Amino acid sequence: MVFRFFASRSINRMYDSQLIIEADQKILQSLYVPIKLGSQIREMVANNTGLDTEYHWAGFTLAPDQAKLSSIKPSLFRFERWLASEFALNQFYSSAPLKTKQHISLLEDLENDIL
């Protein structure tokens, strides 16, 4: 046999859940942090290309400090606009280092906290 298995880490299972969800507009309003960066980008893109388009809040990411983890590194938690759909549809992509049921529960808690 050419390949041999060597158990080198105590964690041998990780989870990663990916969901496409539709959010209530109130969630977006609660999470939105007004910044002038979007206006600045809009102006610069318009100057560079002639294309006048607004830039909106698109999501957030939470990450562990992976430099402090010597074993398997959990993936990032992401909640962001689903780029394949119009912003008006309020569709989002979310990924989490969790089982899918836990991921859904976490998003429901987020929704309940905001609304």
Image (spheres, rainbow, N blue to C red):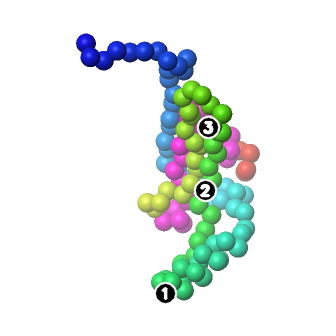
Could you tell me the amino acid type at mark 3?
A: Gln
Query: Which tag, 1 or 3, sits closer to the chain's start?
Result: 1
**Mark 1–mark 2 distance (CA, rounded to whole Å):** 26 Å
Task: Give the farthest residue toward the top.
Answer: 1
Residue 45: image x %, image y %? 54, 79
Residue 79: image x %, image y %? 58, 50
Which of the 4 image quarters holds residue 40? Answer: bottom right
Residue at mark 3: 66
Q: Give, as a single range, the part of the protein colored magenta.
A: 86-111
Residue 106: image x %, image y %? 64, 38
Classed neighbour count for the residue bearing mark 3: other residues with Cα under 10 Å, few (<14), some (14–19), many (≥20): few
Residue 88 is covered by the magenta coloring? yes
Mark 1 and mark 3 residues within 8 Å of each other at the beta carbon? no
Residue at mark 2: 59
- In the image, 31 versus 6, the foreground residue is 6
SS for dot 2: strand
Residue 63: image x %, image y %? 63, 43
Classed neighbour count for the residue bearing mark 2: other residues with Cα under 10 Å, few (<14), some (14–19), many (≥20): some
Which of the 4 image quarters holds residue 80? Answer: bottom right
Q: Residue at x 70, y 57 (%)?
A: 31
Task: Give the farthest residue toward the left.
Answer: 1
Question: Is 61 drawn above or below residue 89 in the view shown?
Answer: above
Could you tell me the amino acid type at mark 1?
A: Gly
Of the numbered discs in the image, which one, if any, rests on residue 50? Answer: 1
Question: Is 10 drawn above or below residue 38 in the view shown?
Answer: above
Could you tell me the amino acid type at mark 2?
A: Gly
Res. 106 in view: no
Q: Residue at x 57, y 26 (%)?
A: 71
Q: Residue at x 56, y 33 (%)?
A: 73
SS for dot 3: helix
Query: Which tag, 3 or 2, sits closer to the chain's start?
Result: 2
Front position among marks 1 and 2:
1
